[in-house]
Image (cartoon, rainbow, N blue to C red):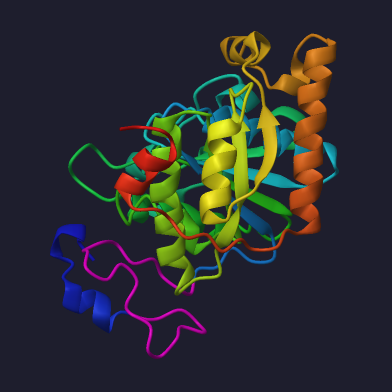
Amino acid sequence: MNVASISPDDILRGPKPRGFPVNAPPDGEGSVQVQLDPRVKIGTAKVFAIYGKGGIGKSTTSSNLSVAFSKLGKRVLQIGCDPKHDSTFTLTKKLMPTVIDALEAVDFHAEELQTEDFCFEGYNGVMCVEAGGPPAGTGCGGYVVGQTVKLLKEHHLLEETDVVIFDVLGDVVCGGFAAPLQHADRALIVTANDFDSIFAMNRIVQAIGAKAKNYNVRLGGVIANRSNATDQIDKFNKAIGLTTMARFPDLDAIRRSRLKKATLFEMEDSPEIRAVQQEYLQLAARLWAGTEPLIAQPLKDRAIFDLLGFD
């Protein structure tokens, strides 16, 4: 269906996922957005979606978490969902072609694609896919996510995968970029100990809550990044019902790892690097073991200003 032709009536008439509550409002009620094919499921893998304010370090977090899972012996697939297509940069050591690039090369005849056209092996065996995005102003990120998962299914790349990590573009700004939540088991939010990051986190909590009404996704917890202190994060978490699962300090070694096209597991050995590696390994082990879903109540905008000390 042409994205531009979608109407609210199309959404209401569209197929519903298995287990869709009879009296639940349609997904994306009040908006016009791409609805993913509910028959396209990822399968038995544990699926995590990483969200957070733009520039907060989601790709660095996602890539190192992917490596941590692989160090635990898990078969990992990381899917970058950003038009910059740099999510897997430190895993593959270069910018890889996107799913959209691959589809355009065959005039969108997906049956002509080979696995190696869009899926690449990165450090320690992590499989890497960059979904990319539609040309600016012309389409919806949800379509790209849907096509990516469909391709992965058709090429049987999800059948022997233990962990899938979606690294998602910036703040949640539309239903399309919330599309990975329709596949995820747990959504993790990366934040720093500052107002802007926490404001974005509050919006993401709202988006996850909206998707949780019709899908299996639930809040997993918070990852504090570039934060030597967590007082503001702790205050917000306590107010709405979140918990911090891991904290990564503002280390220059983390910044340098990105410049060196390397994950933290490839950096020169030092006590601070070992401590960060261990934090990632513990986070991966905790997520693999399973976490209880969090029920959070997002705040109104003014309440965030009042909570974090603004007049």
- Nearest the viewer among 160 and 104 is 160
Q: Is residue 128 among what the camera can see?
A: no
The magenta span reads 15-39
Q: Is residue 277 left or right of residue 76?
A: right
- Residue at 22%, 37% (x, y): give it: 136
The C terminus - image quarter: top left
Tell me: residue 268, above or below residue 4. above
- The percent position of residue 32, horizontal first and vertical second, equals 21, 63
Tell me: residue 20, above or below residue 277. below
Q: Is residue 100 left or right of residue 243?
A: left
- Nearest the viewer among 86 and 122 is 86
Judged from this view, the residue extending furthest toward the bottom is 22
Q: Name which quarter of the figure residue 77 lies in.
A: top right
Q: Name which quarter of the figure residue 277 lies in.
A: top right
- Nearest the viewer among 246 and 87 is 246
- Residue at 47%, 39% (x, y): give it: 52
Q: Is residue 186 left or right of residue 16?
A: right
- The percent position of residue 247, horizontal first and vertical second, equals 68, 32
- The percent position of residue 110, horizontal first and vertical second, equals 41, 54
Tell me: residue 302, above or below residue 184. above
- The percent position of residue 93, horizontal first and vertical second, equals 60, 19
Q: Is residue 26 among what the camera can see?
A: yes
Judged from this view, the residue extending furthest toward the front is 311
